[in-house]
Image: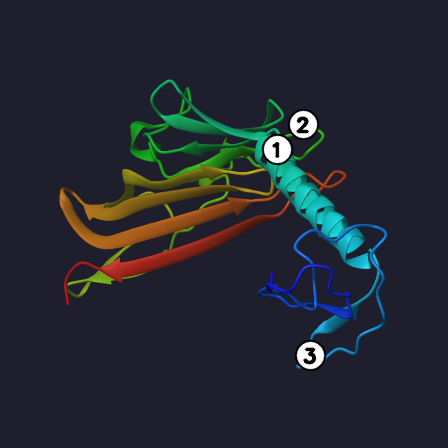
Amino acid sequence: WTSVPTGSRIRRCFISPRRWTRSGVPDEPTKSSSLTPGAAHRGERAWTGDSWENDVRMRLLSCLLVFAALAWCAAAPDPFSFRETDGVSLILTENTAPVFAYNYGAILSRGAPEAMRRSTYLHPVYAPDGNPITDDFNPNHVHHRGISWMWPVVVVDGKTYDLWTVGEIRQRFVRWTKRETTPQAAVLGVENGWYIGERKVVNENVEIRTGPASGNARRLDFTLQFEATEA
């Protein structure tokens, strides 16, 4: 506030983003103060009477509403949750309903040959109504496995390997790189490797972003990165 002689008549009032300014303003304005309209200058808005007091109240109310909204968002329940089961699968749920299982450990179905043991894929994956939409160890195509990514032709040192049919080259889990949940999405990050015996020939990085159910639909986004370990 500017310092003015006692009893001075209020002539105009301005508000700016940085400060309040007045010309001829008493130290303690009252509702009975006599004001005359003032023109805005330098992009500032002119205020008369007690309108500046009402504006301050509105600004404070707006701030309180913003803080209340932020607090509500922070306290909003997170519908997604990750949990590990039996040391081979990580389960994602939304509001306790299963979304998918990521099999990071080696899986073998009863009756399937040992050579078909495999890992690093999604199964089962569920629709929002609870019905599974993937298959695994189908008798007619026992190498098919849920949602997965493999190639039948992988050439290393001039020799061709088949990752698709679970042959001499295998995918193996290395570590988790991300496990995040918010009310808007669940994000799972995984580092895997492609191995020929104990020799790692490819680094594989996977990110799976899962959105909330919308009706009986759900969106899953996959980001896959592959890098040869040797030139």
Estimate the spatial distance between the alpha carbons at disc 3 and disc 2, rounded to whole Å: 59 Å
Q: Which of marks 1 and 3 is nearer the N terminus?
A: 3
Q: Earlier in the sequence, mark 3 or mark 2?
A: 3
- 172 on left or right of 135: left
Mark linked to residue 43: 3
The local secondary structure at tag 2 comes to loop
**Which amino acid, by three-letter code, is at mark 2?**
Gly
x, y (%) of residue 185? 56, 42
The local secondary structure at tag 3 comes to loop
For label 1, the residue is 126
- 52 on left or right of 67: right
Q: Is 61 placed above or below 229 here?
A: above
Q: In terms of depth relative to the viewer, which is nearer, 9 or 229?
A: 9
- 212 on left or right of 201: right
Q: In terms of depth relative to the viewer, which is nearer, 196 or 175?
A: 175
Q: Is 75 placed above or below 160 here?
A: above
Q: Is residue 81 in sight in this rendering?
A: yes
- 157 on left or right of 16: left
Mark linked to residue 130: 2
